[in-house]
């Protein structure tokens, strides 16, 4: 699906409700980065990153939120990034950083708006995670060197936070952003 298309986001939620009888948890995880210096970035490149990373979260979360409000509650988990808190080096990624900071504030705003409707909205801000998408990236040695743990994170190391936020163990948690960055943002 294309998270920048409202109709496709709505159809995703409608399909999930039809096939599974409801939707209790949504994880908004689509994201891209275009590493171009700001002075060279085109408007089209900027829009592509913002549209997927921020607008896509808004469209998908609100499509699910409408349903969750009607059903009496649910949990939405947005993927933000440590890049919403810091400016990463050495790669230039102004649009990515801005979009992920936007996801954090969108998360907080939706959490406040939907708190009395029993819809919890939280985000996870991963650090550098060794996914198939970045395996072999030329900056991995630099990122590892900058990390206090001296390594990249593994995708499965985000599972505990996601499971907590998806479960009833987190019923008093909304509007929170959970850092999972191996202390990268502490230095």
Image (tube, rainbow, N blue to C red):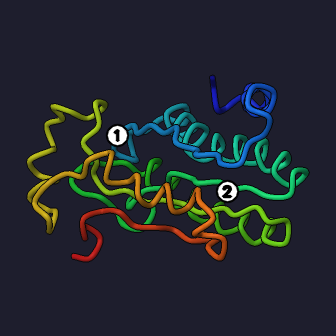
- Residue 182: image quadrant is bottom left
Q: Position of residue 93 (x, y in %)?
A: 37, 48
Check whether the beta carbons of the residues at disc 2 and disc 1 lie within 8 A of each other. no
Q: Where is residue 142 in the image (x, y as percent from the top left)?
A: 11, 52
The numbered mark at residue 26 is none
Between 26 and 179, the one nearer to me in the picture = 26
Quadrant where the N terminus lies?
top right
Q: Which residue is labeled 2 in the image?
A: 75
Quadrant where the C terminus lies?
bottom left
Q: Which residue is labeled 1 in the image?
A: 36
Rate crowding at label 2 as few (under 14), some (14 to 19) or many (20 or more) other CA atoms within 10 Å: many
Q: In this view, does 61 lie to the left or right of 51?
A: right
Q: Is residue 143 left or right of residue 164?
A: left
Rate crowding at label 1 as few (under 14), some (14 to 19) or many (20 or more) other CA atoms within 10 Å: some
Q: Position of residue 141 (x, y in %)?
A: 8, 47
At 74% across and 25% down in the image, what residue appears? Answer: 8
Q: In this view, does 180 lie to the left or right of 170?
A: left
Q: Please tell me whether residue 136 is drawn above or below residue 59 in the rendered image.
A: above
Q: Please tell me whether residue 45 is drawn above or below residue 129 in the rendered image.
A: above
At 65% across and 48% down in the image, what residue appears? Answer: 25
Q: Which of marks 2 and 1 is nearer the N terminus?
A: 1
Between 172 and 128, the one nearer to me in the picture = 172
Q: Position of residue 16 (x, y in %)?
A: 73, 31
Disc nearest the viewer among 2 and 1: 2
At 54% across and 60% down in the image, what residue appears? Answer: 123
Q: Please tell me whether residue 47 is drawn above or below residue 172 in the rendered image.
A: above
Q: Determine whether the residue tagged by mark 1 lies in a helix, strand or loop.
A: loop
At 51% across and 68% down in the image, what residue appears? Answer: 177
């Amino acid at each position: 699906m294309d998270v920048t298309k409202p109709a496709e986001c709505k159809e995703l939620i409608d399909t999930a409700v039809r096939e599974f009888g409801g939707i209790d948890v949504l994880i908004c995880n689509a994201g891209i980065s275009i590493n171009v210096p700001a002075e060279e970035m085109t408007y089209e490149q900027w829009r592509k990153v913002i549209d997927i990373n921020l607008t896509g979260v808004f469209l998908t979360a609100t499509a699910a939120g409408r349903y969750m409000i009607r059903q009496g509650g649910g949990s939405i988990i947005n993927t933000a990034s440590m890049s919403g808190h810091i400016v990463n080096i050495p790669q230039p990624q102004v649009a990515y950083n801005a979009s992920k900071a936007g996801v954090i504030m969108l998360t907080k705003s939706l959490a406040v708006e939907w708190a009395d409707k029993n819809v919890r909205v939280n985000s996870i801000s991963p650090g550098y995670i060794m996914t198939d998408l970045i395996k072999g990236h030329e900056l991995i040695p630099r990122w590892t060197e900058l990390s206090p743990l001296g390594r990249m994170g593994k995708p499965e190391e985000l599972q505990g936070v996601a499971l907590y936020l998806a479960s009833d163990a987190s019923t008093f948690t909304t509007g929170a952003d959970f850092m999972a960055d191996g202390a990268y943002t502490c230095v």
